Image (cartoon, coloured by chain):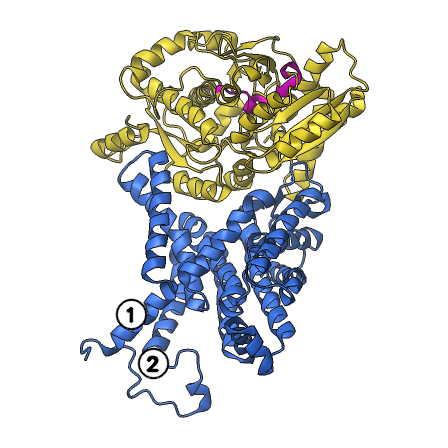
Chain colours: A blue, B yellow
Amino acid sequence: MFYREAGDFSTTYAEDSQTFPIKFDRYRYYLVLVVAFGIIPFLINDYWANAVFVPFLIYAIAAIGLNILTGYCGQVSLGTGAFMAVGAYACYKLMTGFPDIPIAIHILISGGITAAVVTLFGLPSLRIKGFYLAVATLAAQFFLVWLFNKVPWFYNYSASGQISAPERSMFGIIFTGPNTEAWAKYLICLVFVTFAAIVARNLTRGSVGRSWMAIRDMDIAAEIIGVNPLKAKLTAFAVSGFFVGIAGALFFSVYLGAAEVGESFGIDKSFLVLFMIIIGGLGSIFGSFAGAAFMVLLPVFLKNVFVGWLGWPTDLAAHLQFIVSGGLIVVFLIMEPHGLAQLWRLAKEKLRIWPFPH
Amino acid sequence: MKKILTASLVALMAAGPAMADLVFPSLSYRTGPYGANGIPFADGYADYFTLLNERDGGIGGVPARVLECETGYNTEKGVECYESTKGEGALVYQPLSTGITYQLIPKATADGIPVHSMGYGRTSAKNGQVFRNIFNYPANYWDGASHAVNHVLDLNGGDVSGKKIALVYHNSAYGKEPIRTLEELSKKHGYELMLVPVDHPGQEQKSQWLQIRQQRPDYVFMWGWGVMNQVAIQEASNIRFNMENFIGIWWSGSENDVLPAGDGANGYKALTFHNLGKDYPLYDDLQKYVVDAGKAAGAGDQLGTALYNRGMYAAMLAAEAAKTAQEIHGTADITAAMMRDGMEALEMTEAKMEALGLPKFGPEFTVSCENHGGNGLGAVAQWDASAGAWSLITEYGPSDQDVIGALVAEDSAAFAAENNIEPGCS
């Protein structure tokens, strides 16, 4: 009944190749955009922004970035945390060095700087594959964290090695610093996540994305049919780095406001984002959102249920939360190894023929 | 064992939402690599307020409510905890984490809620003209660094030139905090400073202690927390480093840290800004009203440990500040802004502590707008492994305010410039 192509005619090539060719899907997408841009900003408060929406949106950008590299191009990376740190520190240096330039430009430039750094660390991927590449990116993780801890220039010689985001505004609205309104934080993240998702979706549908997927599926075959592995792999690293850098810059400047490299951008962050794309679904933009939502919102939800409603002791709740999230991850991976995105795809298939499955 | 939170939630539901109370959020961590240190502090903090509620009916007749929120020493969870508790009318935040304190300094200032980072956090918050809402009395890290150097000076008859001091530190904002002071003091006193960072969480320190064994520093200072402390003390004992020359900051001086090393930890020294043990009249009341009544927080087995005492001390200072605020504003149901005024006017005297059942428990100090950090007195405690107890081996002594004062002024001025704050007391 839902998701039927029947009666939904495309009369131009542009219509035929749009992202959501089915009418119902398209309207659902518009509805999400309307709610996200038109309704939530008016209802949001500090708690919902800082504990729920802002981390979810920022992790979604990071997950999209990693999904391009790992999900679409098949290059495993364990350096996401450190690459986010590159974005964060680049943004910090830009914010403090050029206070008059709008924050959005700093964030985009931070993404560009991260893209360059990630491409540099992607060079070994031309020689090594699989686990060996994962280890090389792991080295990047430890090297970059060490670098940001060791060289005081990165944190402007502050006594504690912490970086903290000064107040910066754009169009007269404050977007970073403690006086930021909840809706401003939310909207700047939403704009970047929408931008990232649209760009990523269209890149992965085009020739660049096809060359990434060819490399992922079988690099030798891809090379034989004329895909240039150097170009394909390095563009994947660059695009992925760009998004991860944006996520890192937002994570530091909009969400946390103060950060410390070892604590905020350590190896556990790399694993967190990797889990997000594995649970959400490798090679799927929707999966990046689903995975980020699962990993960010579930702990907050469980905490509120256990402590807020049931009134259990906080340590018990914290331990139980690990057990429940861990258990759910295992259950999901056994029952649906292709992630939440695959569940969504199956649900759509079922809805398409519902209520007459035969 | 029922948690305070459960009890207060049930009480709240029974009494209806109109009941006034004083909310003290406790951003605790009972899990993760720092849990061993987080538990006694959180228990002490909660138990003291339970005692006030049970014995005195709260503070000035208004019951205190401790809202506990688990951070796991993680800044992101700390942000979530702050946002979820601030709407409940939180009076003061004590995050027990330098990282979370750095997060909260701008946020809490914007929201007008005071933060009390007792013996941790950003040291230059001592300058209350810049950090209006942040307090770090009675002592801070730079005081601690100076106390450690002073103790070494005492041991050497006032001359440490040519000696080598190693700083083993948690490679984070917390551990890096004393470096600047120790560098300044090394210029003044002529010792050589050697920096030995340990990355989070610090379970593996073989290479650091090998370095110490090779370079043979005369003294080792430690800025460690959580599992890092236990490992460091064990490693020091493994390389047969003379424990008498191993001095930890107050966060590296709990029973949890020394017990795993057994006799090897005998003679280890740690700084402190309050007294240790449970030989105080207040403990009788705690036993009677809290422990025997089955209302103790956590497992109820932490009474009298160093960090339990510190949590209790933090709660006591918060309660005294709340009382001061009630007096200033003439109302029992105070707000966060009134609490700030109370903290700024706090005065701890020997008579006050004796009346509370804690004679000579901490140093006397007064807080003012110019000085949010107290007078920075500290003492050295030493671990006696056979007795299984800490004992103070020095009197409370002053820190080198010539050096620290200048550093505080410099760092707070930098913060003021960065954040467009006009320093002042009005």
Query: What's the residue type where badge 2 is placed?
Result: Lys
Q: Nearer the viewer, residue A203 or A121?
A: A121
Q: Secondary structure at mark 2?
A: helix
* Chain bearing mark 1: A
Residue A323, compared with residue B377, is above or below; it is below
Name the image quarter holding residue B192: top right
Q: In the image, which residues are magenta? A: B243-255
Q: Nearer the viewer, residue A285 or A339?
A: A339
Counting labels gives: 2
Query: What's the residue type where badge 1 is placed?
Result: Ala
Left or right: residue A329 compared with residue B403: left
Decide whether residue B246 is among the magenta residues: yes
The mark found on residue A347 in the picture is 1
Q: Residue at x 42, y 40 (%)?
A: B81
Which residue is outermost to the bottom?
A11
Neighbor class of circle 2 (other Cα within 10 Å; few <14, some 14-19, many 20+) is some
Left or right: residue A351 compared with residue A66: left
